[in-house]
Amino acid sequence: MIIRQLNEANNSTRRVVSPDGNWESTRLLLKEDKMGFSFHITTIYKGADFRMHYQNHLESVYCMSGTGEIVNLEDNTVHPIQEGTLYILDKHDRHILRAHTEMKMACVFNPPLNGNEVHNKEGAYELA
Amino acid sequence: MIIRQLNEANNSTRRVVSPDGNWESTRLLLKEDKMGFSFHITTIYKGADFRMHYQNHLESVYCMSGTGEIVNLEDNTVHPIQEGTLYILDKHDRHILRAHTEMKMACVFNPPLNGNEVHNKEGAYELA
């Protein structure tokens, strides 16, 4: 059993702040934990509006607080996000995320991140 | 892309209430979604105090609200749970979960649940 606390992890290298000022993410569970997925608490800053495309990963994102929207660039549909919304990127979907207020998200990645990834120009994480 | 809302899922067969009165869980993402994990929002009722042993699954549990504690029966250590605590059952650890107040948890299972599981006498989920 492993126990981790978000407030402690926030003061460690587990917390990553995006260079573009859109988000920060604290990786509470990583590849090295050998669970087959990684788990991150991510804050999307108010006003964020950015494009992503996880070409190498499947991801689910659960909104714990805040409001915003996601644009599915595969079919140009727009979906509101609020507390209780889960969006599932099961097809490596290209998407735009917008935060109307600060949003707190619980994110799961498969395969798990190793913790050193940053978004590339496509808004993707490279595989290790 | 799949979008699901907790309040809608709560009014469907995705919501499972434990026969023992300790918890309820809404499975927002299941095996059929082919993500390699399942994702559930679980409420542990105030005063719950019960034993579990996931012999067939790895699980991580993130506390979004409430307080309680987990007893690791492998080494008899007790760990407080509060908002921001993640516990990771990486060794199929036998454990006791206690809720001092109602706790809201975000749970990830690998392999993913198919949605029909209930706890057996060991507090485990059988594989499909």
Image (tube, coloured by chain):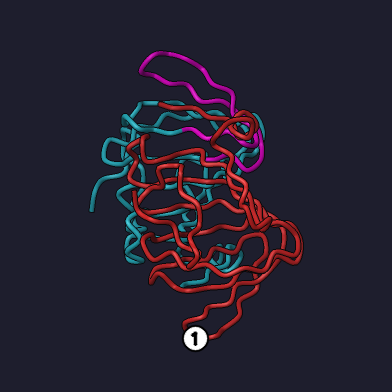
Chain colours: A cyan, B red
- A4 shown above or below B60: below
Residue drawn at x 35%, y 53% is B127
- The front one of A52 and A56 is A56
- B51 shown above or below A62: below
Residue drawn at x 39%, y 19% is A73
Tag 1, which chain?
A: B
Residue drawn at x 48%, y 60% is B120
State which quarter of the image contains the C terminus of chain A.
bottom left
Q: Position of residue B96 (x, y in %)?
A: 58, 72
Q: Describe residue B113's horizontal placement relative to residue B61 as left or right.
A: left
Q: Is residue A78 magenta?
A: yes
Q: Main secondary structure of the magenta part?
A: strand
Q: Which residues are magenta?
A: A62-87
Q: Describe residue B33's horizontal placement relative to residue B26 as left or right.
A: left
* Residue behind mark 1: B75
Q: Position of residue B108 (x, y in %)?
A: 46, 52
Q: Amino acid at mark 1?
A: Asp
Crowdedness of circle 1 by 10 Å Cα count: few (<14), some, many (20+)?
few
- The front one of B115 and B44 is B115
Q: Is residue A20 magenta?
A: no
- The front one of B97 and B88 is B97
Q: Describe residue A75's horizontal placement relative to residue A64 as left or right.
A: left
In this view, which residue lies farthest toward the left?
A: A128
How many numbered circles are shown?
A: 1
Q: Describe residue A75's horizontal placement relative to residue B48 as left or right.
A: left
Numbered disc 1: secondary structure: loop
Residue drawn at x 32%, y 58% is A114
Q: Position of residue A34 (x, y in %)?
A: 32, 64
Q: Position of residue B18 (x, y in %)?
A: 61, 52
